[in-house]
Amino acid sequence: MAVMSILAGSLYASFDIAFSTRGTAEAALQPVRAVGLAVEMLRQEIESSLPPVGILAGEFLGTDAQNDSGQDADTLRLHASAHESVSGERSSDIRKVEFAFELLSEGDEGVLVRRITTNLLAPEVPEPVEDVLCRNVTGLNFTYFDGQDWLDSWDSTTQGNALPVAVQVSVAVGKRGEEGPQRGSYELSRLLILPCGGEEDGDGAAGQSRTQ
């Protein structure tokens, strides 16, 4: 009985350590999984970007910014072909999409949000549908390749109504500390190639050419 008690105690301690280690590993991987899913959603929208010409077309506007805490807080607004329904309904094949990094309140948790506006021909501009793609975000940065150089911002109205050839996306996440959000302990970057990047505008004026 004494030997069995000792063995049972040893097995319990081993299982307890194993489950604790598993919980710690899952907690550490959770931000990595979340930011990976968020970047995948970014990829789908950005790679579906349409040239800013035509009836429903709109500008491709990437703004370089930082918040009061010195964190990268870029925004990106584009028009893309719809690849999924919004709220269970598809009202247009083209929609306006905006990505932004925001704090829920002053000094509070940072989130990556996506706003989608459909039915672009409506008499009144409808309210966008807003989704939180990732929490515990500490930075969002976009850079744009015009075929020759990398730029911190992009305005299609000054780029011959052309899209960038490629977009570099970086999303940083970190755990929240007692004094507020900390610097990102994990950052995921991804290079995205735009199929319509560098194409000519509707008037025949060439945008930035694609390089090999």
Image: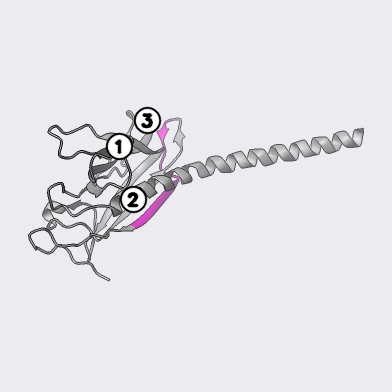
Q: Which mark is residue 89?
A: 1
Crowdedness near tag 2: few (<14), some (14–19) or many (≥20) residues, C-alpha within 10 Å: some
Name, please, the residue furthest toward the bottom. Answer: 212
Write down the quadrant of residue 77 in the picture. Answer: top left
Marks 3, 1: nearer the viewer? 1
Is 157 drawn above or below residue 136 in the view shown? Answer: below
Left or right, residue 180 beside residue 90: right
Marks 1, 2: nearer the viewer? 1
x and y, in percent, of residue 21 in the image: 63, 42
Indicate the quadrant containing the N terminus: top left, top right, bottom left or bottom right: top right
Is 201 drawn above or below residue 131 in the view shown? Answer: below
Is 160 drawn above or below residue 89 in the view shown? Answer: below
x and y, in percent, of residue 208 in the image: 17, 63
Q: Mark 3 or mark 2: which comes first in sequence?
A: 2
User: What distance separates the C-alpha of mark 3 from that of mark 1?
Assistant: 33 Å
Left or right, residue 59 beside residue 194: left
Question: Secondary structure under badge 3?
Answer: loop
Q: Mark 3 or mark 1: which comes first in sequence?
A: 1
Residue range highlighted in magenta: 179-191
User: What distance separates the C-alpha of mark 3 from that of mark 2?
Assistant: 29 Å
- From the viewer's side, name the closer residue of 108 and 208: 208
The residue that appears at 7% across and 59% down in the rendered structure is 203
Q: Which mark is residue 208?
A: none
Q: Which mark is residue 108?
A: 3
The residue to which callout 2 is attached is 44
x and y, in percent, of residue 58 in the image: 16, 47
Question: Secondary structure under badge 2?
Answer: helix
- From the viewer's side, name the closer residue of 123 and 31: 123
Question: Secondary structure under badge 1?
Answer: loop
Q: Mark 1 or mark 2: which comes first in sequence?
A: 2
x and y, in percent, of residue 137 in the image: 38, 40
